[in-house]
Amino acid sequence: MYYRASMVAVLMLMSASALAQANKIYLVDTDRYLEGKVISETDEFIIIAPRMRANDDVCQIRIPRSKIKRIDYDIQTQLNNLADDDIAGRCKVGVWAMEKKMWAEAIDLFEKLKGKDGFDPKMLKLLAQAYEQRQQFDKALNNYSDYLKVQADDAVVVERIQALTKIVKP
């Protein structure tokens, strides 16, 4: 009896962790949603591998965009497919997070990567933009300044630094 209860608890915990690492696609005109890994996206549709078989390329569902209310993305789903030392791949996930307006997640990821071998200093500009979106202007200013050290001819960044300096150091 005790063994059975323990197995049930373990299975519940495994399910909860799988739920925490899945994208959710909420459907129009219903409270229902699908969980799984988003395989591809276009303007017309998305393809998802349902949560129960997320590693199985055979089981995929194509959903028209017109039937989707919203998609809650999970950055961990993207990172799980990468090796810990795949800095370029992790930078691409950071760019993806920026495209999805996942500012906090992008900041966390870029901060962890900053200074590591293979980290593209141009990502500092994206990190600064994410901080700016979160209204953390002092951190945005610092990252724009660091970016300008490697890309001195970026006029847009020079303007952003001037504007942020007025806010941070009035």
Image (cartoon, rainbow, N blue to C red):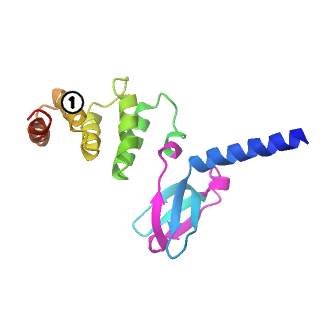
In the picture of the structure, the residue carrying the numbered disc 1 is: 142
Task: Tell me the quadrant of the picture where the N terminus can be found.
Answer: top right
Please tell me which residue is depicted at 75% across the width and 41% down the height of the picture: 10
Residue 8 percent location from the top left of the image: 79, 46
Instruction: Give the residue type at disc 1.
Output: Asn
Q: Does 55 lie within the magenta span? A: yes
Give whichever of 60, 10 is nearer the camera: 10
Task: Tell me the quadrant of the picture where the C terminus can be found.
Answer: top left
Please tell me which residue is depicted at 11% across the width and 35% down the height of the picture: 165
**Quadrant housing residue 95:** top left
Q: Residue furthest bottom?
A: 29
Residue 66 percent location from the top left of the image: 45, 74
Please tell me which residue is depicted at 84% across the width and 43% down the height of the picture: 5
Q: Does 90 lie within the magenta span? A: no
**Quadrant housing residue 3:** top right
Residue 75 percent location from the top left of the image: 47, 45
Give whichever of 168, 131 is nearer the camera: 168
Decide if residue 21 is on the left or right side of residue 144: right
Q: Regarding mark 1 in the picture, which secondary structure is present there?
A: helix
Q: Residue furthest right?
A: 1
Residue 97 percent location from the top left of the image: 39, 47
Q: Which residues are magenta?
A: 50-77
